[in-house]
Amino acid sequence: MSKAGRLESDTDPNTVTVLRKHQAPMKVLKSEAEINAAKKRGDAVDTNKKYFAGQNRQHKTDKNTAVLDAETEELHHERVPLSLGLAIQQARQAKEWTQKALATKINEKAEVIREYE
């Protein structure tokens, strides 16, 4: 006999014990008839008005939008000269690499190599 003694169950082996009962998932009711039927059944009904539905207002504008609109300074990125693309192409061909091989060696996409060349 173990230290805990005899473990016996006091329940009948033919009975079933339900530990959890699954609840019906929440359902979105779209018509008035469905809502009224749910109220008659005694289901909990919660109605919410959707504001700005279908107006694509996912992102708010920044507070400094007016400041950026009033900006008059010319801002742009400097472009690399065509000679750089030519130098990359000549060095790649001297080693007999493809654009894809060069891209994998420098951990870059082949598309970037194509843009430079």
Image: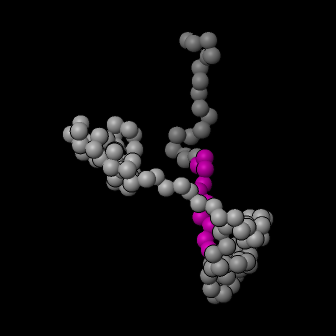
Q: Along the line of sight, which residue is nearer the eye, 112 or 12?
A: 112
- Residue extending farthest to the left is 96
- In which image quadrant can residue 57 be found? bottom right
Q: Indicate left or right for 83 with 43 as reference.
A: left
Magenta residues (range):
18-28
Above or below for 102 versus 43: above
Q: Mostly what secondary structure, the magenta segment?
A: loop
Above or below for 48 versus 92: below
Q: Residue at x 34, y 45 (%)?
A: 87
Q: Residue at x 57, y 12 (%)?
A: 2
Q: Along the line of sight, which residue is nearer the eye, 28 or 51?
A: 51
Above or below for 38 versus 58: below
Q: Along the line of sight, which residue is nearer the eye, 67 or 47?
A: 67
> Is 37 contained in the magenta span?
no
Q: Residue at x 66, y 87 (%)?
A: 32
Above or below for 76 versus 83: below
The N terminus sits in image quarter: top right
Please provide percent x and percent y for residue 62: 74, 64
Please provide percent x and percent y for residue 88: 34, 44
Please provide percent x and percent y for residue 19: 61, 46
> Is 27 contained in the magenta span?
yes
Q: Is residue 114 visible?
A: yes
Q: Is residue 47 visible?
A: no
Q: Indicate left or right for 30 with 68 as reference.
A: left
| Figure coloring | one colour
Please provide percent x and percent y for residue 18: 59, 49
Q: Residue at x 43, y 53 (%)?
A: 81
Q: How many marks?
A: 0
- Residue extending farthest to the bottom is 33
Q: Along the line of sight, which residue is nearer the eye, 78 or 31?
A: 78
